[in-house]
Amino acid sequence: MSGATPDRRGRGFQSAARLLKERIRVAGESRGFAVSRLLTHWAEVVGEEIAAMALPVKIGYGREGIGATLTLLTTGAAAPVLQMRLPKIRERVNACYGYNAISKVVITQTAPVGFAEGQVAFRPAPKAPPAPPDPASIDAARTLSGEIGDPTLRAALEALGEKVLSRPGKRKG
């Protein structure tokens, strides 16, 4: 097999980014994105807060080819906030390109469940910390595990008892 192309197994592991790089470039170029980094690192380019509200959909170039228009997809509720931040978004996107490529940013609004293509990725709100356990549940768990001699096992059973006894809708005692 000398002279033949190397066997796939001989190359070792490849990063996912390396495997997808060409596909992302082709998909991005079909939408006008000359720099795929804008798509793949959107949150780093514009910041986490703006990235949670909007996604880049396409870049359109005018007839003269000077000054492109970036189209962002967002929900109606976030549109006024984005409208106020358009100069900052444009500045950060142009910094990603390395020159003044984007002259205009346009906002397109949709519902959270809308068009099949290009929906805004909404992140769930962070979960609230669990409520502290009920003191009665703690006492009941200590009473039930009180006869256990091993302190580590007793502490684990107390913690389990607290969780079980403090679950909402469950009968205590």
Image (cartoon, helix red, strand yellow):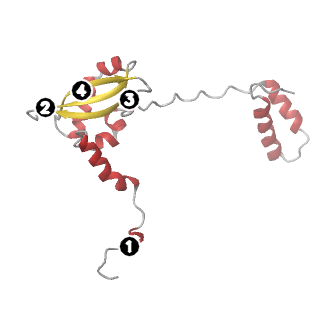
State the SS at label 1: loop
Q: 76 or 18: nearer the eye?
A: 76
Could you tell me how far apart the alpha carbons at marks 3 and 4 are, in whole angstroms?
A: 20 Å
Residue type at mark 3: give it: Phe
Q: Earlier in the sequence, mark 2 or mark 3?
A: 2
Instruction: Please say if 100 is above or below 20.
Output: above
Number of the front mark, 4 or 2: 2
Q: Earlier in the sequence, mark 3 or mark 1?
A: 1
Residue picked out by circle 3 = 115
Disc marking residue 7: 1
Discs 4, 2 touching: Cβ within 8 Å: no
Number of the front mark, 2 or 3: 3
Residue type at mark 4: give it: Val
Crowdedness near tag 1: few (<14), some (14–19) or many (≥20) residues, C-alpha within 10 Å: few
Number of the front mark, 3 or 1: 3
Discs 3, 4 touching: Cβ within 8 Å: no
Q: Earlier in the sequence, mark 2 or mark 1?
A: 1
| Residue 115 location (% of width, % of height) | 38, 29
| Residue 148 location (% of width, % of height) | 89, 44
Disc marking residue 62: 2
Q: Residue at x 35, y 55 (%)?
A: 18
